[in-house]
Image (cartoon, rainbow, N blue to C red):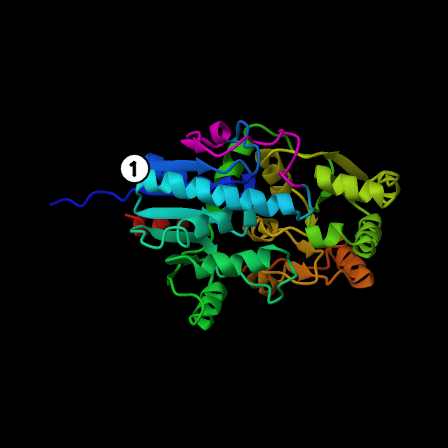
Amino acid sequence: MEKKNSRIAIIIGTKAELIKCMPIMLELQKQRREYFFIHTSQHNLGDSCEEFGVKRPDYVLGIEPAKEIGTKFWAKIKLTTFLWCIKTMFNIRKIVRVIKPNYVIYHGDTMNTAMAAAGSSSILNPFKKWKNVHLEAGLRSGSLLEPFPEEITRRIVDRFSDLLFAVSDLSEKKLKKEMSFVRGKIKKTGNTIIDSSLITYKKAKKEYKLQEKEYALINLHRYENLKSKKRMRAISEIIKSVKSNAIWPIHSTTEKYFKEAGLLEEIKNKKNVKIIPLVNYFNFIFLLANCKYLITDGGSIQEESLVFKKPCIILRKKTERQEGLNTGINFLTGLDVEKTKEIIKKIETDKIKINNFVNPYGEAGLTKKIVEILK
C-alpha cells in the first residue's frame, strides 16, 4: 500500500523567514505536495510570495504593518511585543488544531513568530500528534545578550522542537551537548539559505546591471548596536574609513537611530558612501554577489557571503555563525575600530587571499534532503 504524503504546516512571520523557507515551499510545489502557509503578519510580505513563486498565505493572523516599516515593533522590545506574541500563540493553536498536520515547521530565531509557533504547537497542545520542526537549529553565539533576543529565542525554540534540522557540523555538535535540555531528534541538513541565495541570484541576473565601479556593501540593523551610542560611534568611524565606493541600503530603524545620534550626516558627507533606501532581496543578493566585500552586523548575510565567496566584516562582539570564521573570509571584529580599519585596508589593497573552502552550511540542492525527511 502506498504511503500518503505528510500534511505540512509552515509558519512564517518575517521576510527573512520567507526567504529561507522559500526553497522548501518551491520543492513541495514542484512535487505537487500540499502544504499550509500560516503568516503571523510580523512583517509585510507584500508581493514577495509572487516574486519568489510561492503561494500566498492560507491563513493570515492579524493585519500586516505598512510596507515601508521593516518590523512591527521597531528595534525596541516593549510590552506590546509580548502581548502580540501571546495573542499569536493562541491564534496558531486554533489553526493547527483545524489543519491537523503531521509536521509544523518554523524557522530561525524570532520571538514573535518562531518562539510563538514552537510554544503554541507544543506547550498549548500537550496532547499533539504532530511533530514540531525547527529549521536552522543549533546556531549559538555563547552569549545570551549577543545577539539579543535571538540567542535566547533559539534555545527556547530548540527546546520545544521534536525535529531539529542542524545547519552544520558545529550546530549538530552543540545540540548534542544540550541533550539534557534539547529532547528532539537531530538531523544535520545544512542551511536552506544556500538554495535561497542561488535561486534568487539566478533570477536577479536577468533584471539588474553591474555597477560601473568596485564597491563595498553595507548592511546594519542589530538591536544591541542601535541601542548603544558608543557602538554607533565606533561603526560610524569604521564606515568613514572605507576608501573604496560603498553602497548602504539603509533600514528605516537604522536611519532613525543614526540620525538621532547625530552620526548620519557625517557619513552622508563621505562622497564615496552612497546611502539608498532598502532594496528587495533580489536586488540585495545581486549587489552582494558582485561587491568587493561586506560590512555588516547581520546574521544570514554571513552565510550568504560564503555562498558568493565575499570577505565579510562582522561588526559584532559575538556571532552565532561561528562556522564561517574558519573559512578565512569572515572576520569578527569585536567592534574594535583600529582592528577593523586594518582588515578593511587589507581587503581594499588585495592583501587577503580567498582560498577554496568547503561551505560549512552545505551545497546547492540540500533542500531536497529536508523535503525527503518530511515525507
User: Element under label 1?
Assistant: loop
**8, above or below 320, in the image:** above
Is residue 355 or residue 191 the one in the foreground? Answer: 191
Q: Is residue 54 magenta?
A: yes
| Count of numbered circles on the image | 1
**What residue is drawn where x is 78% and y is 37%?**
274
Q: Which span of residues is magenta-colored?
A: 49-73
Residue 110 in magenta? no
Q: Residue at x 50, y 51 (%)?
A: 115
In the picture shown, does residue 352 fall above or below 245?
Answer: below
Res 364 visible: no
Q: Residue 54 vs residue 218: left or right? A: left
Quarter location, residue 248 = top right
Q: Position of residue 264 (x, y in %)?
A: 84, 41
State the residue in front, 356 or 287.
287
Residue type marked 1: Arg
Residue at the outermost left position: 1
| Residue 366 picture location, percent across and down | 40, 50
Residue 19's spot in the image, x, y percent? Answer: 51, 40
In front here: 355 or 174? 174
Q: Nearer the viewer, residue 96 or 167?
A: 96
**Badge 1: residue crowd in 10 Å (few <14, some 14–19, many ≥20):** some
- Name which residue lies at 48% across and 41% down: 12
Residue 345 visible? The answer is yes
**With 362 as the anchor, is 213 left or right in this view?**
right
Per the image, the residue denoted by label 1 is 33
Percent from the top left, x then y, of residue 49? 48, 31
Look at the magenta stretch and give its main secondary structure.
loop
